[in-house]
Image (spheres, rainbow, N blue to C red):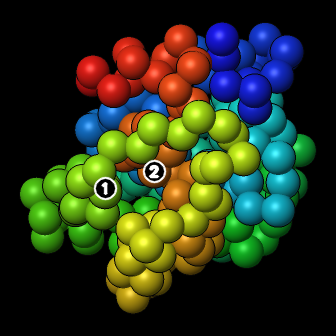
Amino acid sequence: MRCSWAGDTELYQKYHDDEWGVPLHDDGGLFEFLLLEGAQAGLSWETILKKRDNYRKAFDRFNARKIAKYDEKKIQALLQDAGIVRNKLKVRAFVTNAQVFLRLQKEHGSFDAYIWQFAPRKKNSWKRMEDIPAMTDESDAMSKALKKEGMTFVGSTICYAFMQATGMVNDHVTGCFRYTYVNNK
C-alpha cells in the first residue's frame, strides 16, 4: 500500500516512492526544498513538481550564492519565465531566503545543523491520512525562528510540509510500504 496522497499519477508516485520523507542532510537539497515549499504556497505540490526542472534551470540549480546576488534585472527576467510560478513576492523571497540561508550556514557550520534542531524527538505513526496535522509545535517554532532571521514564505504549514519532504518527520501512514524503510533511515 502507498499513501493515498500519491494518487495514481506517475510523477506523484515516483516522488512519494523515491524522495518524500527520506531524511535529508545535504544543505543544497534542504535549500531547494525550502524554496520550493514556499513557491507552492496556495498551489498544489503537483504544480511545483511539474515545474521543478524549470526552477532548477531558472535558479541556477538552487545555488544559494548565485541566487543571493540576483539583481532587479535578473528578478524581472525570472518574472517573465513561464516555466516557474511568476509571483513577484515568491521570486523575491528566493533571493532574500538565499541571503539568510548563507548567513545561517556560516553561523552554524551548515544549514543542516541549524534546521534539524527543529525536528521532533518522537516518531510519528499515523494510521490514516486524516490524522496527519498541517502544522505542529515544531513547525511553529521553525517558522517563527526563520521569520525572525528574515526569511519569507516560511509559515508553519510550509515549514511542516518541508519537514515532511525532508524526513524530519515520517508522515507515511503505517500501512504504507515506505513507512518502515523511512523509519529505519
Q: Quadrant of the N terminus?
A: top right
Residue at the bottom extreme of this rendering? 148
Residue at the (47%, 33%) spot, across then down: 21
Counting residues from the start of the chain, the first of labels 1 and 2 encountered is: 1
Q: Nearer the viewer, residue 184 or 166?
A: 184
Secondary structure at badge 1 equals loop
The picture places residue 12, in percent across and down from the top left corner, at 74, 23
Q: Is residue 82 visible?
A: yes
Nearer the observer, 64 or 152: 152
| Residue 70 at least partly seen | no
Instruction: Specify the farthest residue to the front.
Output: 127
- Residue 70 is situated, as x and y percent measured from the top left of the image, at 54, 64
Query: Three-letter amino acid code at disc 1?
Result: Ala
Please state the horizontal and vertical placement of residue 63, each as a whole percent of the image.
Answer: 42, 45
Please identify the quarter of the rendering in which residue 23 is found.
top left
Query: On the image, numbered disc 2 is attached to which residue?
Result: 163
Image quadrant of residue 43? bottom right
From the viewer's perspective, is residue 116 above or below residue 154? above
Could you classify mark 1 by the number of other residues whose Cα lies within 10 Å: few (under 14), some (14-19), or many (20 or more)?
A: some
**Image marks 1 and 2: residues in contact by CB distance under 8 Å:** yes
Q: Disc 1 designates what residue?
A: 119
Q: Nearer the viewer, residue 101 or 82?
A: 101
